[in-house]
């Protein structure tokens, strides 16, 4: 997942930081502040770019107490920079208004890039308190810019002259985006409506921050506590040891704790032999944020839904989905819904077929019950082993984490794009488990800096994501500084860090986002790298997953950690054959979550009044047309962080939409020779280096030569027949 920073960029204006400005399409140098404008002098650790290589954050010098004053100072400076644009006595031009706006806010962007990284991956009570305090302040700051009538008058004056202006395609894209984002923020509303938008935005910022922090605590508190080692039968000794250590860390020596991951299903459900324990673990996950205590999120999500619907109505839109999808590749909720709903009949039939198959396996196991959600993964694994003779514990020894990263993920990037990597130990990090690498381009020049943070921690939010500490821009001369964050359980001290093939694919996925950022080749920060639509940003990362199982790449990294022997061909074949197994569950739970998201965000303002979260969710799930009692959605409403705080509201379908793009693109790669430099260079040139400078459909056509096709996705999932050779 690409994690976008909550700066002015993320909210639509994309006012990112920069230190220099050059000639524009109007050949008009950017004017400095007017005589009446006074910009405060920046002070403190974030006042200037770091002096470390690539301007990487100096975590050795940054203290928790630095963030709040730096953010407040950054907002003050940014406000003064914007006021200087407004006060400029010269007539509005592309340079002195659009480019100047894009380049404002350098200190604020710099501190927020670091702050959001540590609050996501290594937070504490102090940082959480700062987060809660500054979120509404940031929202008010962003609104003051986006809704400023004098600023919009200058932007509109330039926009209205676009037909007679001489602009590059990137200039035109920046102008269009700046204008449309301000309109979308409310620039054309009445003064009364703007005041209402500001108030709604402030409330939403406060509530979404509260939801995020509450959910983190709920996930931590919701861990399953067990009294006896016998209850953990089926887990490996190292996993039992980790559960014992987790209990000690919580002050409960002699007990065992299974911590929760962010999704509904939990990894240990595949191996725990005690059915009562499996049910307890599933219920701990399912009810983590619904216990009626201080960590219950249901009232929060109802209020968020109400405020979003109210804001959409102010803009004349029927619901939040219609309001937010203006800049998406799919464009409208109907397009996204039609796309997903065409998969429902085949998925529902597959879920019923798989459930019957699992019930047969349960009966063969001598058990007298029908499959429930807490049984599904265990018996699916039994059937998978029997059908494909594959055991996850047989697979893991071939995937040692560092070897996967350096000889798999990095090797694929070398074969496709000519990149090379060198680990370094001189760059300060925010946690000892973070690794850093310099990335070199195909010509040997430095391309950027990469951070890798793989392991699960109680103070890290769930999931996996990518973002930037520093974004690329030819105006600033800055090269990208990018981090990947995962949540892989850390092996006990002294044991090898082996990972599942799912973890392997996640590593490739997140590095696909990183490549999208590293190959950024833009002038303007607002359009650089992964600053693209929500339903396009996951596309490059999903394509990169294909190389995890490519025979050429696998042969280079899938080697036994003890013997060094390559993974046997027959085991690779089993992994490939098994990839289509259990799709009724794995694809179904994602489609269900995406449809649940759309249900929440298709509510009108009237429909949100008096809303009960439990009743709404139950009705919504019953209407999806799938077997949700057996295959619950990947995220329940109460712990659906993506849509209630992470910017995926009415956008979770993006994972499926980009999967369609991905599977269609994989067929292109396969038909054109696979992991070759020529293919990599073509993908880099047509997609990865374009950022947000072009419309997405023409960009996609430039790569594949045709419009996106859904059949490759359905074939890959085994929902329709493979095409005959």
Image (cartoon, rainbow, N blue to C red):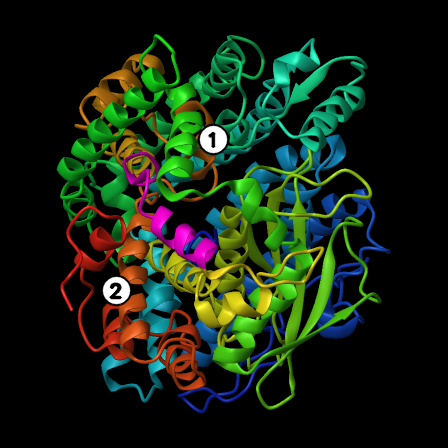
Q: Quadrant of residue 42?
A: bottom right
Q: Locate residue 35, reporting x and y percent.
A: 63, 73
The secondary structure type at the circle numbered 1 is: helix
In this rendering, position of residue 200 left or right of residue 244: left
- Of residue 657 and residue 191, the one placed in the foreground of this image is 657
Whether residue 464 is situated above or below residue 227 in the rendered picture: below
Q: Is residue 577 magenta?
A: yes
User: What main secondary structure does the magenta stretch of the protein show?
Assistant: helix
The residue segment tinted magenta is 570-587
Number of marks in the rendered image: 2
**Above or below — where is 617 with respect to 401?**
above
Whether the residues at callouts 2 and 1 have beta carbons within 8 Å, the answer is no
* Residue at the spot of label 2: 664
Quarter of the image for the C terminus: give it: bottom left
Q: Report which quarter residue 473 is drawn in.
A: bottom right
What residue did someone put label 1 on?
Answer: 203
Residue 320 vs residue 232, the one in the foreground: 232
Seen at 19% across and 50% down, the residue is 332
């Amino acid at each position: 997942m690409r994690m976008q920073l909550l700066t002015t960029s993320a909210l639509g204006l994309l006012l990112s930081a920069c230190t220099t400005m050059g000639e524009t399409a109007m050949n008009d140098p950017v004017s400095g502040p007017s005589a009446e404008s006074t910009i405060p002098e920046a002070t403190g650790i974030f006042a200037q770019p770091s002096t470390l290589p690539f301007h990487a954050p100096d975590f050795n010098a940054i203290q928790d107490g630095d963030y709040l004053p730096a953010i407040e100072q950054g907002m003050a400076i940014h406000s003064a920079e914007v006021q200087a644009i407004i006060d400029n006595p010269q007539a509005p031009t592309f340079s002195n208004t659009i480019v100047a706006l894009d380049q404002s806010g350098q200190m604020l962007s710099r501190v927020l890039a670091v702050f959001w990284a540590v609050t996501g991956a290594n937070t504490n009570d102090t940082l959480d308190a700062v987060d809660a305090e500054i979120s509404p302040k940031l929202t008010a700051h962003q609104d003051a810019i986006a809704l400023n009538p004098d600023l919009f008058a200058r932007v509109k004056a330039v926009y209205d002259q676009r037909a007679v202006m001489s602009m590059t395609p990137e200039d035109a894209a920046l102008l269009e985006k700046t204008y449309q984002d301000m309109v979308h923020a409310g620039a054309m509303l009445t003064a009364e409506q703007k005041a209402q938008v500001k108030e709604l935005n402030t409330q939403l910022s406060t509530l979404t921050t509260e939801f995020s922090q509450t959910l983190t605590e709920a996930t931590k508190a919701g861990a399953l506590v067990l009294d006896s080692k016998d209850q953990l039968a089926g887990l490996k000794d190292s996993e039992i040891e980790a559960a014992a250590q987790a209990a000690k860390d919580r002050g409960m020596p002699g007990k065992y704790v299974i911590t929760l991951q962010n999704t509904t299903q939990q990894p240990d459900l595949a191996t725990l032999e005690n059915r009562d324990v499996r049910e307890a673990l599933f219920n701990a996950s399912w009810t983590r944020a619904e216990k009626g205590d201080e960590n219950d999120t249901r009232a929060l999500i109802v209020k968020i839904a109400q405020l979003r619907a109210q804001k959409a109505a102010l803009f004349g839109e029927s619901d939040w989905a219609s309001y937010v999808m203006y800049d998406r590749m799919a464009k409208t909720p109907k397009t996204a819904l039609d796309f997903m709903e065409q998969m429902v009949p085949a998925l529902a039939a597959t879920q019923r077929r798989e459930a019957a198959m699992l019930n047969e396996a349960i009966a063969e196991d001598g058990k007298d019950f029908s499959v429930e959600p807490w049984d599904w993964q265990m018996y699916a694994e039994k059937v998978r082993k029997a059908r494909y003779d594959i055991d996850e514990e047989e697979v893991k020894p071939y995937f040692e984490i560092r070897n996967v990263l350096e000889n798999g993920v990095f090797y694929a990037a070398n074969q496709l794009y000519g990149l090379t990597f060198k680990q370094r130990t001189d760059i300060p990090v925010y946690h000892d488990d973070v690794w850093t690498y310099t990335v070199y381009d195909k010509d040997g020049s430095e391309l950027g800096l990469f951070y890798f943070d793989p392991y699960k921690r109680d103070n890290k939010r769930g999931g996996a994501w990518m973002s930037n500490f520093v974004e690329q821009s030819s105006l600033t001369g800055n090269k990208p500084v990018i981090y990947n964050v995962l949540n892989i359980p850390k092996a006990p001290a002294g044991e090898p860090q082996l990972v599942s093939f799912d973890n392997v694919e996640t590593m490739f996925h997140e590095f696909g986002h990183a490549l999208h950022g590293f190959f950024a080749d833009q002038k303007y920060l607002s359009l650089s790298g992964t600053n693209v639509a929500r339903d396009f940003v996951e596309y490059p990362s999903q394509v990169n997953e294909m190389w995890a199982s490519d025979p050429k790449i696998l042969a280079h990294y899938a080697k036994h950690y003890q013997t060094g022997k390559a993974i046997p061909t027959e085991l690779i074949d089993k992994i490939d054959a098994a990839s289509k197994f259990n799709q009724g569950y794995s694809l179904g739970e994602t489609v269900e979550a995406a449809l649940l998201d759309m249900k929440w965000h298709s509510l009108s303002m009237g429909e949100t009044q008096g809303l009960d979260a439990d009743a709404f969710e139950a009705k919504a799930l019953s209407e999806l047309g799938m077997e949700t009692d057996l295959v619950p959605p990947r995220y329940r409403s109460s712990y659906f962080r993506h849509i209630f705080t992470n910017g995926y509201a009415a956008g979770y379908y993006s994972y499926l939409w980009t999967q369609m793009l991905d599977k269609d693109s994989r067929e292109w790669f396969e038909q054109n020779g696979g992991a070759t430099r020529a293919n990599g260079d073509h993908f880099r040139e047509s997609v990865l280096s374009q950022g947000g400078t072009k419309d997405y459909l023409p960009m996609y056509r430039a790569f594949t030569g045709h419009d996106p096709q859904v059949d490759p996705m359905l074939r890959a999932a085994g929902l329709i027949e493979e095409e005959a050779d």
